[in-house]
Image (cartoon, rainbow, N blue to C red):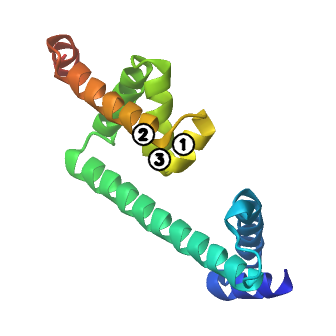
């Protein structure tokens, strides 16, 4: 554990973030313990998990920063104080609730939570192919709903 903490502190340069990273690593390793090959180096396996989590979180943070700066830039250019973006978020929330529960759940897990199809399938206790189909149907249904005249009329008013 001390070696993991040291490596995490090196990567994050923040004690609290490093401790969180080690905790995430241990949790993920416990969840994936069936994937560990007996007789191999557990330390290397844990370091690989820690490193992968670190870079995954880093990519997510970069993506979030880009999205937030784009929203900020759009609101400055539009002069509406971000109201247009806020309306789109509210519209999406309303549209999501129009989906059947299984499709909505699949789309939230894979789309919003950025889980893999495998992780989402495990959570929903269904095959990976079923999860992929649910996400696909959810996206198609959202496209269908947003293209309907009733939605267009409501959005233009």
Q: Earlier in the sequence, mark 3 or mark 2?
A: 3
Query: How far apart are the two marked residues, 1 and 2, measured between alpha carbons?
Result: 11 Å
Return the residue found at the far right. 2
Secondary element type, mark 3: helix
> Which residue is more in the foreground, 96 or 153?
96
Quadrant into which the C terminus falls: top left
- Residue sitting at x 36%, y 22%: 95
Using residue 22 as the reference point, say whether residue 94 is left or right of it: left
Mark 3 and 1 residues: CB-CB less than 8 Å, in contact?
A: yes
Q: Give the label, 3 or 2, closer to the camera.
A: 2
Question: Which dot marks residue 117?
Answer: 3
The residue singled out by tag 1 in the image is: 120
Q: Are marks 1 and 2 in contact (CB under 8 Å)?
A: no
Q: What whole-number distance in Å separates the C-alpha atoms at marks 3 and 1?
A: 5 Å
Whether residue 128 sits left or right of residue 77 in the image: it is: right
Disc 1, SS: helix
Are the residues at dot 3 and dot 2 in contact (C-beta closer than 8 Å)?
A: no
Tell me the number on the disc at residue 129: 2
Residue 156: quarter of image:
top left
Residue 128 in the image, given as x and y percentages of width and height: 47, 42
Q: Secondary structure at mark 2?
A: helix
Determine whether 35 is above or below 117 in the image.
below
Residue drawn at point x = 51 percent, y = 40 percent: 109
Q: Which part of the image, by quadrant, shows the N terminus?
A: bottom right
Residue 14 sits above or below residue 53 on the image: below
Looking at the image, which residue is at 67% across and 84% down? 13
Mark 2 Cα within 10 Å, few/some/many (few <14, many 20+)? few
Report the side of 3 relative to 155 (left or right).
right
Q: Is residue 138 left or right of residue 9?
A: left
**Percent x, y of residue 62:** 43, 67
Q: Tell me the quarter of the picture where residue 51 sits.
A: bottom right
Badge 1 or badge 2: first in the primary sequence: 1
């Amino acid at each position: 554990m001390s070696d993991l903490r040291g490596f995490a502190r090196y990567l994050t340069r923040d004690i609290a973030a490093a401790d969180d990273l080690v905790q995430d690593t241990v949790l993920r390793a416990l969840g994936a313990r069936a994937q560990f090959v007996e007789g191999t180096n557990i330390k290397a396996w844990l370091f690989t998990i820690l490193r992968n989590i670190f870079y995954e979180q880093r990519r997510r943070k970069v993506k979030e920063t880009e999205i937030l700066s784009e929203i900020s830039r759009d609101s400055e250019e539009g002069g509406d104080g971000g109201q247009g973006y806020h309306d789109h978020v509210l519209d999406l929330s309303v549209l999501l609730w129009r989906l059947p529960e299984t499709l909505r759940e699949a789309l939230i897990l894979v789309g919003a939570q950025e889980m893999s199809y495998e992780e989402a399938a495990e959570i929903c206790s269904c095959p990976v192919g079923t999860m992929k189909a649910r996400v696909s149907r959810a996206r198609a249904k959202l496209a269908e709903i947003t293209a309907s005249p009733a939605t267009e009329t409501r959005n233009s008013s």
